[in-house]
Image (spheres, grey):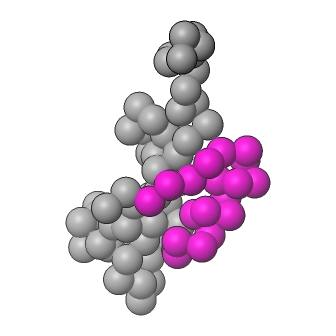
Amino acid sequence: MNTKFDLKSMGEDIVYVKAIAVTELPQELQQQAGDLDTLFSVHNAQGEQLALVANRKLAFHLARENHMRPVTVH
């Protein structure tokens, strides 16, 4: 129980996947979304948006292809 952990490095490979309503995006992105109602945003632990993709499956695939561990944000 006395194992030390480097808490600063924990979570560096975790990304968060969040559903975003297209109506909440800037007009330019809304036009690019076509007929989609929802897009999925991928964020790092600091909250920086890394990607915006068409569906959840693609978001998870993209994260794993880049050696990240995706988790869903509710």
Q: Is residue 65 magenta?
A: yes
Question: 22 or 73: nearer the eye?
Answer: 73
Estimate the x, y position of residue 28 in percent, counting from the top left: 36, 65
At x 59%, y 13%, the residue is: 3
Which residue is at the far bottom? 35
Query: Toward which corner of the image does residue 9 lie, by quadrant?
Result: top right
Q: Quadrant of the C terminus?
A: bottom left
Estimate the x, y position of residue 45 in percent, counting from the top left: 45, 35
In this rendering, does residue 47 appear at all?
Answer: yes
Q: What stretch is highlighted in magenta?
A: 54-72
Estimate the x, y position of residue 37 in percent, counting from the top left: 35, 83
**Compared with residue 1, is residue 43 higher up or lower down, i.e. above or below?**
below
At x 65%, y 45%, the residue is: 68
Q: Quadrant of the N terminus?
A: top right
18 to the left or right of 23: right
| Numbered marks: total | 0
At x 68%, y 64%, the residue is: 61
Q: Is residue 58 magenta?
A: yes
